[in-house]
Image (tube, rainbow, N blue to C red):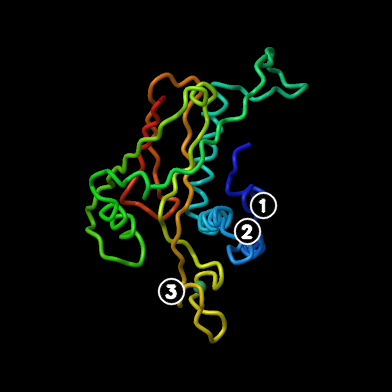
Amino acid sequence: MPETYYVILGVAEDATVDHIKSAYRQKALELHPDHHGDDAGPFLAVQEAYAVLSNPERRRAYDRSLQTAELRASRPEPKPVRVGHRHPHPPAVVPVEPVDIGEVSLSRSFETFSPSFEAIFDRLWSNFAGRSRPKDELPKSLTIDVPIAIEDAEIGGFARVMVPAVAACPTCEGHGGVGPFECWRCSGSGSVTGEFPVQVEFPAGMTSAHVATVPLDHLGITNTYLVVRFRVV
Ligand SMILES: [Zn+2]
């Protein structure tokens, strides 16, 4: 089962905003890097999930993308048929778990690329912090190459591309302060920066290459989209 934002926060898909908020507070406390060693991954995942689900517009877009992903996923590998369903031919093949090839860091991928990582970072950053941007700015692609082992290509799976972005500060919930005090975590800005995982899938039975285009709107990045080139090695 894919880790949807709902699964990450442990809430139902029809959860209310209040419910999502309290689930987020609970999880953010549990997984906070200060209490959870060096692994900030789960904490950032919770941040990303909350940033999307707490915003009605972004939540709607995400729900739509979930439905599309479900439709896509059910085409090559139909879900097991429930007893009593009218489907005459239950699939004989047992579904195989997709391969998680792990995190792909943009900063690492771009050491040898042009434009420089600084230029890319700058473009991503211009989505946040109220920087002025040209109104007619067209979204640009950001291409990364991801090698896939031949065994993994047969099964299909996904990579998690770590995209730098800004999310609501978990300590002050984006208010910049707690009571009369300035928030220590975000120094009053109300937001924190981090690398947020974006899951990108590659299909089963991939023979040479597969290109996936991924919008980053759910992270608040509208001037850049990812182009992930999976290459069988
Ligand atoms: Zn804060």
Q: Is residue 133 above or below residue 148?
A: below
Callout 1: few (<14), some (14-19), or many (20+) C-alpha neighbours within 10 Å? some
Label 2 belongs to which residue? 20
Residue 92: which quarter of the image? top right
Q: Secondary structure at mark 3?
A: loop
CB within 8 Å, label 2 to label 1:
yes
Pick the residue in front: 130 or 123. 123
The residue lying at 37 percent from left, 30 percent from top is: 211
The residue lying at 43 percent from left, 61 percent from top is: 166
Dot 1 beta carbon under 8 Å from ligand 1: no
Dot 3 beta carbon under 8 Å from ligand 1: yes
Quarter that holds the N terminus: top right
Label 3 belongs to which residue? 189
Callout 2: few (<14), some (14-19), or many (20+) C-alpha neighbours within 10 Å? many
Q: Earlier in the sequence, mark 3 or mark 2?
A: 2
The x and y percentages for residue 174 are 50, 70
Q: Secondary structure at mark 1?
A: loop
Say whether residue 181 is visible.
yes
Q: Secondary structure at mark 2?
A: helix
The x and y percentages for residue 46 are 57, 56
The x and y percentages for residue 231 are 39, 28
Q: Earlier in the sequence, mark 3 or mark 1?
A: 1
Distance (Cα) linking label 3 and label 1: 28 Å
The x and y percentages for residue 125 are 33, 59
Label 1 belongs to which residue? 11
In front: label 3 or label 2: 3
Three-letter amino acid code at disc 1?
Val
